[in-house]
Image (spheres, helix red, strand yellow):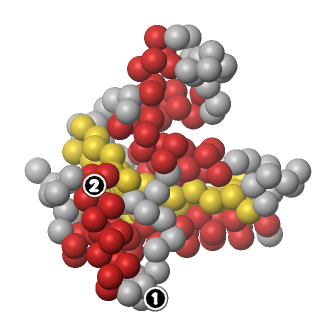
Amino acid sequence: MTVLKMYTDGACSNNQGDVNFGGWGSILEFGEHTKELYGGEANTTNNRMELTAVIEGFRALKRDGLEIQVFSDSSYVMNCFRDKWYVNWQKNGWKNSKKQPVENRELWEELLALVAHHKVSFYRVKGHVSVEKSTDAALRKLYDKFVEWNGESFTYDDFLYVTDRNNRADELANLGIDQVRE
């Protein structure tokens, strides 16, 4: 079975300001086929854009029952799925561990519904790593962290490729920001 790989990123310019611009990017790879998606919105947050990148990737799928690997530099998204935060959120009436309403609940509910139709694995990536400008020693150290987060099934070349795709997803998110600014 061919595994669909999804690389996502969200971005927000002036994240803490009264007026800001957010963007998201998602890359889908299925066999020899690649699809790039991006968009944005005004007056949002980085976390909303990170979630939107994953949601839009899933929305673009044409069928259910796929095996999917999601790669993201968002701790917010990765920790939710890997540590199963959503289980307690649902059990506690969508309250977090501090007994406060879960932020971005509507996005989480949509994403959980989309993920339920597939077999999905989530992998964390270190964001904003310049492969071209980093020393081999620095990249090897980042690779070790990548393996610590995601397991030993990834080679160094896999790590470099995933990092490259994450950087491209970031570029797409910035295109989304530019689109909203216009």
Q: Would you identify the image quadrant in which residue 4 lies?
A: bottom left
Disc ID at residue 52: none
Q: Which residue, given by chain and number where applicable, does mark 2 sit on?
A: 148
Residue 87 appears anywhere in the view: yes
Left/right placement of residue 176 relative to residue 140 reads right
Q: What kind of element bears circle 2?
A: helix
Badges 2 and 1: C-beta atoms under 8 Å apart? no
In the rendered structure, which amino acid carries the disc numbered 1?
Answer: Lys
Give the residue drawn at x 28%, y 65%.
144
Left/right placement of residue 24 relative to residue 178 reads left
Residue 29 appears anywhere in the view: no
- Picture coordinates of residue 74 (x, y %)? 50, 51
First in residue order: circle 2 vs circle 1: 1
Residue 53 position (above or below residue 169): above
Left/right placement of residue 168 relative to residue 18 reads left
- Picture coordinates of residue 127 (x, y %)? 48, 65
In the rendered structure, which amino acid carries the disc numbered 2?
Answer: Glu
Give the residue drawn at x 28%, y 36%.
118
